[in-house]
Image: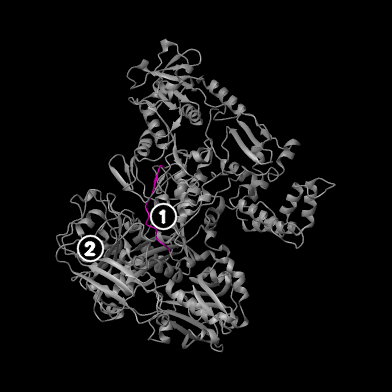
């Protein structure tokens, strides 16, 4: 924050922030006629969409005091955006402006009284936000003076003509050094004043680093040696690796520096002559550490003195592809025999107002920091080194290469002569052939054979190719808009179709990784693009076709933002006919996760959080939690390919067997260790091996006598033909076993359980060819009057279907013995007790769906770690266990007894919503603008939270009447046309039950949950008038498509906000009026509903709601073309 004083002595406390869309109205109010003379008549929204950086100054009341917009090309059309450098260098050869160090001010407004102070505050903020920035240009017509404000910052350097018409424009410049200090670095001494301190050491424990980290991209931090062993002897076993840089890990090392008797160790101080100086760039610090030569950075770039230090024999090896990506093998580690080429920073500290040589023979600077250390300015330009999976060290390792100090990086369109350099760059990449094919295609025709425009850009340093990017014109932009929430990041209508591009390949030498955002920014400028999209396809599956570009590669994924997928309407296309949406919107494509960047994001800061978050359990809660951390949105379980969590999450396959709370580590499969900073337990409950009661059939015992024995844990041999199905992998293994053992034709099967999974298993067995007469469906005694189906009509239809298929059903049967109590492996018969007499069944396979519970090994891990367990893992209302670093959620958990709510637990609610809320509770821990909380506030820990999401169950079944409310039922369960809606006393849809022999759009029907019956086109009235013979057909009519739209909930919120807002002075809002009627504060001679309707018709609210609905339909026309609005009829 800063304090500004006006000429009249008024004081304002101000701060700068990024401009937001809601600022536009206030910004427009600051525009004067003089502003238009300086910058022209501009569309502020359009300019903000295309800006690289927009800064707003606010006072302590959040009132906007000033605003400015910056782009990476000049305004007033004095030069083309892809070719302005030569024009400005001819203007003044003493100004070494480049796209890296230059921005252009396109707009500035301010409150007149504080304009000068606000301008200087903006300029300081821009230089601080963009460390590489040295020059800001301002271009205005020559006949217009700058005025008293702008002239305090900008100096004129010359005039240039306009490209389109005969008029000259004055060019003014603002230099960084006028607003930021120049730091000076020297060796530390006792006397003197310093603002920073750094201790560096040339002795590095390279063997430890080689053991723990993948150093292949950096040649092991060693000087190349002819006897280096870089590949295993068996060449065929070597697997090529994709961009290892993009898959950074999270488990790093403890100590890099050795402590021998003789070390080369130096310290330096960072000093400055300026009192008001603030931060400076990482390069200013490191350049002095790397070298003590007196030449400035430009001279070093010209004579390649820095690059030559990489390899004394061959400069090219410093930037060769061997430095680019590692070849990782779990059994092979390269052997580096050359001398160490690295030094490390032992200690670094600097005044927060400042951020700034000693090893001219070293190429790599290393620094290690603890995992939870916030990312500070120095390491933001470092590359994080990827650890090996077996790394047990608790620090992150970062590296910076000497060549990374070069500022002469150039991004340009590729040409034919670049082919050898690109071949060398990508030679170790799995996709090298595709990249080279695209380069050849671009050089030949600049477009694909199908006509799609193609562009290839290269990054060049000192005449060497260090990066390549391939983009294509985005041909499916309407599909992307309708299937992904790209409008979270852009105003779609302000971007032309040709401005959208698809990033197909991106590879950059990791020693220049800190220039990735600059590379992307230059692609947008030179390619005349405003947005880039990068799809991540799921891994190829056998028998499924893959897109030719589905296995693309990018090392820039860290700098892109993931885009949330949108829920899609399942359209009845035949019924809609010409009113159906376009094929671009409704077509089926291979699913992919979408990543995005645009001009606004190229200079957006991104803070890396190195906290190790370990999630145990791939349950719906766990997946929803992870997805929310990535997208801040609840996940779509229709297709996990829409999320591509593997791009952001490291997956460890195994079973948790122990938790070491002191060391903060999870033991997996008894011998693997995974370290954590935050542990999330979402293991849920699974079907367990049932425990036979042991009652012999000859004893003639009943269920009541042996019920307690069935609750014990089974500890014997697990039979090989006993199948417990908890996930898709279990099902696939079982199906494989059944086919290999000829069970379909010869064996008999027992399905034991009364859950929905048991019913769907019987249906699956029938569907894959099992005879119904060979299936025994055994229901254990029910523990509640509420069944898994909970609908008498559906249950009757299912019972009839089972009987027709020949399936034998037994009720209230409790498992007593396998094989008469003898060796149970394999099972060839099973005995059951009932409430009357026992019975025995022969079988070849036994499926059990009897009671879900917490896995024993999981329970033992909790118990041994002294986590409080009372039937389930005990948590508080903020998901904490008795360990502040361990949280839990889902059916695994229960609330502490102090809440007196044992009947309520997470198992009562939607798993997706619980995962979302768990992530929301944790996101505040990683927000750098918030102070971390060590314990939850007391007022948040009194009442248990309630969730509103629907708890959904479904499956393919074989072919409870409410106390209050209304049943709306059509069809017949036995004929497979059953559809039931239960409307509660508040006229809201509370239960949806569908039983159909035909597939139905379940994702559409789920959106009906919680809707008022009047929203469903006066459903109850129409049903009473016998106008709805079939609900399946009713919900395919065009009028209801908006109900299924993913943004319909936003429309409802907007309409409600209008009704509760104060629109007319002296009159109550519609909400206040409803409350008055409810409290009988108004005496009426008519029904309250009619009174409300009459008041609404005569009020301003009616027109506002109609306008809002029409805007919604117009804006979402591509999804909802079946609706009419004024002007099209």
As drawn, the label of residue 704 is none
Position of 157 compared to 194: left or right?
right
Q: Secondary structure at mark 2?
A: helix
Q: Is residue 196 above or below residue 627?
A: below
What residue do we see at 32% from left, 42% from top? 668
* Residue at the spot of label 1: 549
| Residue placed most toward the observer, 793 or 1062 | 1062
The answer to whether one can see residue 202 in this image is yes
Q: Residue 1000 appears at what percent x and percent y?
A: 58, 38
Q: Residue 100 appears at what percent x and percent y?
A: 40, 74
| Residue placed most toward the observer, 601 or 443 | 601
Q: From the image, state whether disc 1 or disc 2 is nearer to you.
A: 2
Q: Main secondary structure of the magenta part?
A: loop
* Residue at the spot of label 2: 221
Q: Determine if the magenta segment contains residue 612.
A: yes
> Dot 2: within a 10 Å radius of its alpha carbon, few (fewer than 14), some, or many (20 or more) residues?
many
Q: Are marks 1 and 2 in contact (CB under 8 Å)?
A: no
> Dot 1: within a 10 Å radius of its alpha carbon, few (fewer than 14), some, or many (20 or more) residues?
few
Give the magenta part as a residue range.
606-617
**Quadrant location, the C terminus:** bottom right
Q: Residue 312 appears at what percent x and percent y?
A: 18, 71
Q: What is the distance, in whole Å, between disc 1 and disc 2 at their CAs?
A: 35 Å
Position of 1055 compared to 880: left or right?
right
* Marks 1 and 2, the one that precedes in the sequence: 2
Q: Residue 646 appears at what percent x and percent y?
A: 39, 50
What residue do we see at 75% from left, 50% from top? 1076
């Amino acid at each position: 924050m800063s304090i500004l004083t006006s000429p009249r002595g008024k004081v304002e406390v101000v701060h700068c922030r990024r401009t937001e869309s809601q600022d536009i109205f206030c910004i427009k109010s600051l525009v004067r006629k003089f502003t238009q003379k300086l910058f022209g008549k501009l569309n502020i929204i359009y300019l903000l969409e295309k800006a690289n950086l927009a800064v707003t100054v606010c006072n302590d009341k959040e009132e906007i005091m000033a605003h400015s917009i910056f782009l990476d090309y000049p305004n007033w059309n004095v030069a083309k955006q892809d070719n302005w450098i030569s024009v400005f260098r001819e203007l003044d050869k003493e100004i070494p402006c480049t796209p890296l160090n230059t921005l252009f001010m396109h707009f500035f407004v301010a409150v007149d009284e504080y304009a000068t102070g606000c301008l200087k505050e903006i300029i300081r903020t821009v230089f601080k936000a963009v460390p590489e920035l040295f020059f800001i240009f301002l271009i205005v017509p020559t006949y217009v003076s700058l005025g008293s404000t702008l002239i305090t910052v900008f100096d004129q350097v010359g005039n240039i003509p306009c490209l389109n018409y005969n008029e000259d424009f004055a060019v003014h410049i603002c230099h960084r050094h006028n607003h930021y200090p120049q730091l000076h670095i020297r060796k530390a001494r006792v006397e003197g004043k310093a603002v920073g301190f750094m201790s560096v050491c040339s002795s590095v424990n390279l063997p430890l680093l080689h053991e723990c980290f993948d150093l292949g991209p950096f040649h092991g931090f060693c000087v190349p040696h002819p006897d280096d062993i870089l590949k295993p002897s068996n060449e065929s076993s070597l697997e090529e690796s994709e961009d290892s840089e993009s898959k950074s890990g999270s488990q790093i090392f403890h100590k890099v520096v050795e402590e021998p008797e003789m070390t080369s160790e130096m310290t330096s101080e960072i000093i400055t002559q300026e009192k008001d100086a603030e931060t400076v760039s990482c390069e200013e610090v490191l350049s002095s550490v790397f070298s003590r030569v007196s030449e400035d950075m430009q001279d070093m770039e010209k004579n390649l003195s820095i690059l030559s230090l990489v390899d004394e024999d061959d400069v090219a090896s410093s930037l060769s592809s061997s430095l680019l990506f590692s070849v990782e093998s779990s059994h092979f580690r390269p052997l580096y025999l050359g001398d160490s080429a690295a030094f490390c920073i032992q200690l670094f500290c600097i005044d927060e107002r400042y951020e700034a040589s000693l090893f001219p023979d070293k190429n790599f600077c290393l620094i290690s920091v603890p995992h939870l250390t916030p990312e500070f300015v120095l390491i933001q330009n470092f590359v994080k080194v990827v650890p090996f999976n077996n790394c047990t060290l608790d620090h992150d390792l970062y590296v910076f290469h000497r060549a990374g100090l070069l500022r002469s990086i150039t991004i340009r369109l590729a040409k034919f002569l670049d082919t050898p350099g690109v071949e060398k760059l990508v030679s170790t990449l799995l996709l090298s052939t595709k990249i080279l094919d695209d380069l050849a295609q671009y050089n030949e025709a600049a477009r694909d054979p199908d006509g799609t425009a193609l562009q290839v850009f290269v990054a060049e340093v000192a005449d060497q190719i260090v990066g390549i990017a391939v983009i294509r014109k985005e041909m499916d932009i309407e599909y992307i808009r309708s299937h992904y929430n790209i409008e979270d990041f852009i105003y779609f209508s302000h971007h032309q179709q040709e401005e959208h591009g698809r990033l197909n390949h991106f590879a950059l030498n990791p020693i220049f990784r800190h220039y990735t955002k600059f590379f992307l920014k230059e692609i947008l400028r030179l390619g005349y693009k405003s947005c880039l999209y990068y799809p991540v396809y799921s891994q190829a599956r056998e028998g499924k076709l893959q897109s030719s570009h589905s296995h693309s590669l990018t090392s820039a994924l860290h700098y892109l933002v993931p885009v949330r997928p949108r829920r899609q309407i399942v359209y009845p296309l035949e019924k809609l006919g010409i009113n159906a949406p376009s094929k671009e919107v409704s077509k089926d494509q291979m699913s992919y996760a979408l990543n995005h960047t645009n001009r606004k994001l190229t200079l957006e800061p991104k803070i890396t959080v190195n906290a190790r978050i370990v999630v145990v359990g791939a349950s719906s809660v766990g997946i929803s939690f992870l997805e929310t951390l990535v997208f801040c949105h609840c996940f779509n379980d229709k297709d996990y390919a829409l999320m591509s969590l593997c791009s952001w999450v490291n997956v460890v396959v195994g079973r948790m067997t122990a938790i070491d709370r002191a060391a903060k580590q999870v033991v997996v499969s008894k011998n693997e260790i995974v370290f954590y900073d935050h542990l999330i337990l979402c293991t849920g409950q699974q079907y367990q091996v049932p425990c036979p009661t042991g009652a012999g059939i000859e004893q003639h015992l009943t269920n009541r006598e042996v019920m307690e024995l069935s609750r014990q844990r089974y500890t014997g041999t697990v039979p090989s033909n006993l199948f417990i199905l908890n996930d898709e992998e279990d099902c696939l293994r079982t199906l494989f076993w059944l086919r290999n053992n000829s069970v379909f034709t010869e064996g008999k099967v027992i399905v034991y359980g009364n859950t929905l999974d048991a019913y769907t298993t019987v249906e699956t067995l029938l569907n894959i060819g099992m005879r119904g007469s060979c299936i025994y469906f055994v229901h254990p005694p029910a523990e509640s009057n509420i069944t898994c189906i909970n609908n008498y009509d559906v249950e009757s239809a299912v019972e009839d279907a089972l009987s027709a298929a020949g399936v034998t059903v037994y009720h209230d049967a409790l498992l007593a013995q396998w094989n008469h109590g003898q060796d149970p492996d394999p099972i060839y018969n099973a005995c059951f007790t009932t409430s009357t007499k026992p019975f025995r069944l022969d079988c070849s396979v036994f499926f059990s769906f009897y009671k879900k519970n917490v896995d024993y090994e999981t329970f033992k891990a909790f118990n041994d770690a002294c986590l409080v367990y009372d039937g389930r893992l005990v948590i508080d209302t903020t998901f904490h266990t008795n360990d502040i670093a361990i949280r839990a959620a889902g059916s695994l958990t229960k609330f502490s007894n102090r809440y007196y709510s044992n009947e309520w637990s997470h198992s009562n609610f939607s798993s997706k919503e619980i995962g979302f809320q768990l992530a929301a509770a944790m996101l505040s821990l990683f927000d750098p603008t918030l102070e971390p909380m060590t314990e939850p506030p007391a007022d948040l820990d009194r009442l248990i939270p309630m969730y509103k999401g629907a708890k959904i169950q479904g499956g393919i079944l074989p072919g409870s009447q409410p106390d209050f409310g209304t049943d709306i039922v059509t069809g017949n369960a036995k004929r497979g046309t059953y559809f039931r809606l239960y409307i509660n006393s508040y006229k809201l849809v509370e239960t949806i039950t569908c039983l159909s022999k035909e597939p139905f759009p379940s994702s559409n029907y789920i959106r009906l949950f919680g809707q008022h019956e009047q929203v469903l086109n006066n459903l109850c009235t129409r049903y009473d008038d016998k106008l709805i013979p079939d609900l399946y057909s009713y919900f395919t009519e065009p009028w209801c498509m908006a109900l299924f739209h993913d943004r319909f909930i936003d429309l409802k919120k907007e309409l409600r906000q209008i009704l509760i807002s104060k629109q007319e002075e002296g009159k109550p809002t519609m909400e206040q009026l409803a409350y008055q009627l409810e409290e009988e504060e108004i005496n009426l001679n008519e029904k309250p509903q009619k009174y409300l309707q009459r008041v609404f018709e005569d009020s301003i609210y009616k027109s506002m709601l109609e306008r809002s609905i029409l805007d919604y339909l117009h804006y979402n026309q591509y999804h909802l073309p079946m609706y009419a609005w004024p002007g099209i009829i």
